[in-house]
Image: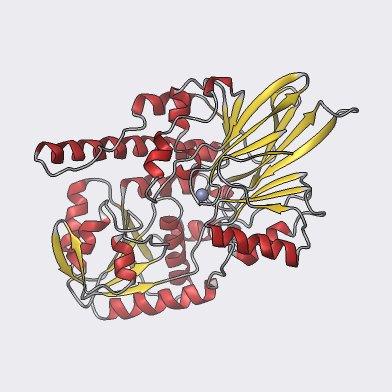
Amino acid sequence: MQIRFLGAAGEVTGSQYLCEGVVAGERRRFLVDCGLFQGGRDAHDKNEQGFAFDPASLDFVVLTHAHLDHSGLLPRLCAAGFRGPIYTTAASLELLKILLPDSAHLQTADRERAERRLEKGRWHGELPTVLYGMDEVQTTLQQVRPFNYGLTFQPVPGILVRFHNAGHILGAAIAVIDVAIDQVTPSKTRRLVFSGDIGPSGPFMMPAPELIPHADVLVVESTYGDRLHKTMEQTRDEMVEVVTHTLRHGGNIVIPAFAVGRTQEVLLLLAELVRIKRLPHLNVFIDSPMATAVTQLTAHFRDALEEEAQDMLAWHEAHPEALRLRLVSDVEESKSLNLIRGGAIIISASGMCEGGRVVHHLYNNLPHQQNAVIITGFQARGTTGRQLVEKARTVRLFGREVPVNASVHTVGGLSAHADQSGLLTWLGGFASPPEKVFVVHGEPDASNKLAEAMRNRLGWKHVTIPERGTSFLC
Ligand SMILES: [Zn+2]
């Protein structure tokens, strides 16, 4: 088997790995993940580039999870001729039904906005490309074949695939792929393990990632390979302090949060704090159509959650008055939240304050000092969220300078990714070192530090950080 690293190599986004070789007498070719490149100057170019192989020649695709940096180029792959099955979990399929149409919609909206500005002479440079539309998304969704964790299936003779819970987001999987290699006699099986994104080892909403005892070849993520997260205990304390203080002074709390995962984690954390009486009764509004859809989906797939999280959901259903939750759907209702002067907790997207309904809430709440903003996720350089974290005195919203008089707090500890120690715990689950290990899905520093820790602490010798476009015989 040969593995070619076509994305998430030396960076975090654009996961795409091409595997090819002769299996059971046939030349086989499959792809693991097909993600969008996001952020960074050349992301657009990379997304627009054609594929490095003929999509029609693929036998199948394995998708580890629904995040767009793993799934976001699938509609382009299908439009370029791939007609085969896309294997993923049932929960991932449901998330794809929410995320891919949204991605298509955002691309069209960006393009139309740019065209309007061009007409007025206010757009310079190239117009943003629409990578795919709703038709391509629908075709893609029809090609998805869901399999639950623990089931073994055979996409083609000689290749067996199984998903294990990665503890990252709903439906996220570690893909274990057994390939019967022909070139050696007697024919031998090689086990390829793709970690996908690995969740934290001190689980909160999702269970800890399943340990895999054996791999011949391991491809492992390294998003936070160079750092340690704050503990959940610190996170609880920080949350209690800010919420108590703000509500006591009659303010509102705005929590910008990613619609998938983070919104639901924040909600469960608040519910837990109310249940153990560290917080009073709360009025919480989830104001993001996508977050609302995903929150409902999370309740539907509750069996996939960590046991305590399941208990919390059950408790909340039995005590709806303790944490009054309002899922805001229409725009008018969203705007009416602007009239609330105090006592509300508003969770809204986008997570980095770069668009979406949260911008309205910031616009209305930032100027007043009794209010608070709680940042719960990573804020990329250049975003409004990052400016808030860096204590900007004003931020530009809707073309106006808005004074930041509200207090801004960063609550660490909530993360869908394992930190270095979490990754090492998961890696420690292998009974013996895999013959070949590839570190992907990380900034160079994070990948290097994780590789170093693997060599020093686990004693693994053959650890490689592949560059984009390189191939390895495995
Ligand atoms: Zn992910």
* 141 vs 388, nearest the viewer: 388
In the image, residue 190 lies at what x, y percent? 78, 37
Quadrant where the N terminus is found in the figure: top right
280 with respect to 213 (left or right): left
Residue 384 visible, this angle: yes
Q: Quadrant of residue 226?
A: bottom right
Quadrant where the C terminus is found in the figure: top right
Residue at 40 percent across and 44 percent down: it is: 43
In the image, residue 309 lies at what x, y percent? 54, 59
Question: Extreme right residue here?
Answer: 186
In the image, residue 178 lies at what x, y percent? 75, 35
In the image, residue 289 lies at what x, y percent? 31, 46
Q: Quadrant of residue 386?
A: bottom left
3 with respect to 37 (left or right): right
* 52 vs 430, nearest the viewer: 52
* 378 vs 219, nearest the viewer: 219
Question: Extreme left residue here?
Answer: 120
* 428 vs 235, nearest the viewer: 428
Residue at 45 percent across and 60 percent down: it is: 316
- Does 446 sit above or below residue 133? below
Residue 278 visible, this angle: no
How many numbered circles are shown?
0
469 with respect to 259 (left or right): right
- Does 437 sit above or below residue 474? below
